[in-house]
Amino acid sequence: AQSVTQPDIHITVSEGASLELRCNYSYGATPYLFWYVQSPGQGLQLLLKYFSGDTLVQGIKGFEAEFKRSQSSFNLRKPSVHWSDAAEYFCAVGVYFGNEKLTFGTGTRLTIIP
Amino acid sequence: ETGVTQTPRHLVMGMTNKKSLKCEQHLGHNAMYWYKQSAKKPLELMFVYSLEERVENNSVPSRFSPECPNSSHLFLHLHTLQPEDSALYLCASSQDQTAANYGYTFGSGTRLTVV
């Protein structure tokens, strides 16, 4: 079965600094990969997704993620964070065949300091 | 507006009460999901409905009873809950059951507190 690991429970960065959130997956074939963001008291919003093709994908709010097959990773990046980026971020993996559903990581909470 | 609406946003209920959570989507999606989100735990998939038919039930206690009367509406009926059932309950929908292709659209959730 597929699984997702987000090794960082909590990350703090200064406003304007760059950001990288880590995500590692376990799956026997090329997975479908997603990043979601959840603001306090809200549901999850899709930031970006990777299906195939270019391994660097662009998303909303200035985020991007890079799929690295050799490292089984799909890290999320942003060159300059804004205070409004403070939220919880979830990586998810989906399988292509069978009873498709998404498996989510445990999330990374992002705190932005002035 | 996310396209998936959940009501109520907050619910406090006693352990002997019966209540229902409602989820509504007008995205033309054919699959709907209930997830439970507890602190410091991964999202737990509870139920999956595809074309109004339940296709997955992840060993959820019988005090949670889902209902999908049509492809736009999903309910979660609650009765005799326990304090450990307090959590954020999220509804999601996807174009069809091949969710991997499209991802999910989530509602804002119902924050449930059992007292």
Image (spheres, coloured by chain):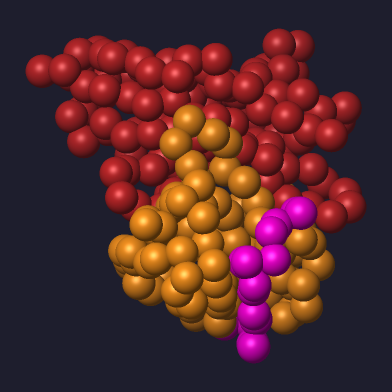
Viewer-proximal residue, B103 or B23? B23
The hue used for chain B is: orange
Q: Dividing the picture into quarters, in which one does residue B49 lie?
A: bottom right
Tell me residue B94's x, y (percent). Answer: 63, 64
B59 in magenta: yes
Residue found at x 57% / y 36%: B42
Tell me residue A87's x, y (percent). Answer: 32, 34
The tally of labels here is 0
Q: Residue furthest left?
A: A114
Would you say B67 lies left or right of A76 here?
right
Viewer-proximal residue, B86 or A54? B86
Q: Dividing the picture into quarters, in which one does residue B58 lie?
A: bottom right
Instruction: Indicate whether B40 appears above or below B111.
Output: above
Tell me residue B23's x, y (percent). Answer: 49, 74
Tell me residue A68's x, y (percent). Answer: 67, 17
Q: Dividing the picture into quarters, in which one does residue A54 lie?
A: top right
Would you say B112 lies left or right of B59 here?
left
Would you say B93 lies left or right of B17 here?
right
Q: Residue furthest bottom?
A: B69
Chain red in the figure, letter: A
Q: Which residues are magenta?
A: B58-72
The N terminus of chain B - image quarter: bottom left
Residue found at x 52% / y 62%: B81
Asked if residue B29 can be seen in this view, the reply is no
Viewer-proximal residue, A82 or B72? B72
Asked if residue A89 can be seen in this view, the reply is yes
Residue found at x 69% / y 66%: B62
The C terminus of chain B - image quarter: bottom left
B76 in magenta: no
Instruction: Indicate whether B103 appears above or below A53.
Output: below
Would you say B110 lies left or right of A69 here?
left
